[in-house]
């Protein structure tokens, strides 16, 4: 595993990291197009190989703190402009300095943390189906994770200042990203199904009495 490349680029492919039996079990979870947040006692076990890789990339034992399952099909085919993931899922609302605003997504409580929190995290994208060039692979702006928070209106311009990586994958492949990296996704040009489980990892506790929501 190329730890230095991950630190430099903010993105790293981990081929065939997810065992076939775990991939099959994850495919059985209910989906809802543009993202359903998963919380299930089976997830920590199914994610064990990915959790080990995330821990290696973060340099200390990490745990999954949010899981979102995306299911792009001909009927649910969306595009996402250049952006950063800016919120985290927490167990309950606790007012803490630097955290806010608050929101609910798919019933889960979220808050925007200071950028220093995001910069200590890793996000993995677990591919449950093949994702070729016609099937809306994620696009990332390499090394953009070191820019801090980028205003939404400037995200596309900022991404254009970096080398773009097209994240192709086979089923079972995992892409790991530094959580604040700039990324985007087009509409699929292929009718084939593209399911991907996105999991956020952290190796630290939140300050001010806040607690991670977790996944199981």
Image (spheres, helix red, strand yellow):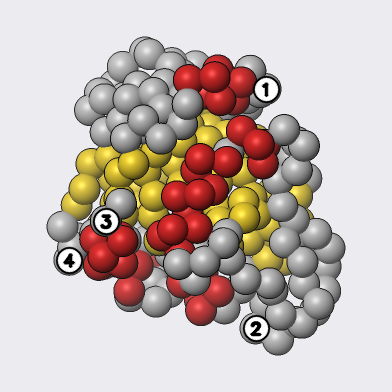
Label 2: state its secondary structure: loop
Residue 69 appears in which quarter of the rendering?
top right
Would you place residue 119 above or below residue 80 in this image?
below
The answer to whether residue 76 shows anywhere in this view is: no
Please indicate whether residue 100 sits to the left or right of residue 107 in the image: left
Would you place residue 26 above or below residue 124 in this image?
above
Separation of disc 4 and disc 1 at Cα? 38 Å
Question: In the rendered view of the protein, which quadrant contains the C terminus?
Answer: top right
Separation of disc 4 and disc 3 at Cα? 24 Å
The residue tagged 3 is 2
Q: Decide: marks 4, 1 in contact (CB < 8 A)?
A: no
Please identify, in this view, whether the residue under mark 4 or under mark 3 is nearer the observer: 3
For image coordinates 61% across by 21% down, the residue present is 25
For image coordinates 58% across by 39% down, the residue present is 47
Q: Position of residue 32 (x, y in %)?
A: 63, 27
The residue tagged 1 is 30
Separation of disc 1 and disc 2 at Cα? 35 Å
Separation of disc 2 and disc 3 at Cα? 33 Å
Label 3 packing within 10 angstroms: few (<14), some (14-19), many (20+)? few
The residue tagged 4 is 161
The answer to whether residue 13 shows anywhere in this view is: yes
Please identify, in this view, whether the residue under mark 2 or under mark 3 is nearer the observer: 3
Disc on the earlier residue, 1 or 2: 1
Please identify, in this view, whether the residue under mark 4 or under mark 1 is nearer the observer: 1
Q: Which mark is residue 98?
A: 2
Disc on the earlier residue, 4 or 3: 3
Residue 171 appears in which quarter of the rendering?
top left
- Check the image and name the residue furthest to the top: 191
Label 1: state its secondary structure: loop
Disc on the earlier residue, 2 or 3: 3
């Amino acid at each position: 595993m190329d730890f230095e490349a991950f630190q430099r680029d903010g993105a790293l492919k981990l081929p065939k990291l997810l065992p076939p039996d775990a991939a099959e079990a994850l495919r059985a979870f209910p989906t809802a197009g543009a993202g359903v947040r998963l919380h299930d006692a089976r997830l920590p076990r199914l994610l064990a190989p990915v959790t080990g890789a995330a821990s290696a990339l973060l340099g200390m034992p990490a745990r999954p703190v949010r899981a979102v399952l995306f299911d792009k099909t001909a009927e649910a085919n969306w595009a996402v402009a250049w952006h950063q993931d800016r919120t985290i899922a927490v167990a309950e609302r606790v007012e803490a300095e630097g955290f806010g605003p608050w929101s609910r997504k798919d019933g889960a409580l979220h808050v925007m943390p200071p950028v220093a929190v995001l910069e200590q995290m890793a996000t993995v994208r677990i591919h449950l189906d093949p994702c070729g060039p016609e099937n809306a692979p994620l696009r990332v702006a390499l090394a953009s994770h070191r820019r801090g928070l980028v205003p939404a209106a400037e995200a596309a311009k900022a991404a254009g200042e970096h080398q773009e990586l097209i994240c192709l994958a086979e089923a079972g492949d995992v892409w790991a990203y530094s959580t604040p990296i700039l990324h985007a996704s087009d509409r699929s040009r292929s009718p084939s199904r593209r399911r991907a489980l996105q999991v956020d990892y952290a190796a630290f506790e939140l300050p001010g009495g806040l607690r991670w929501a977790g996944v199981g």
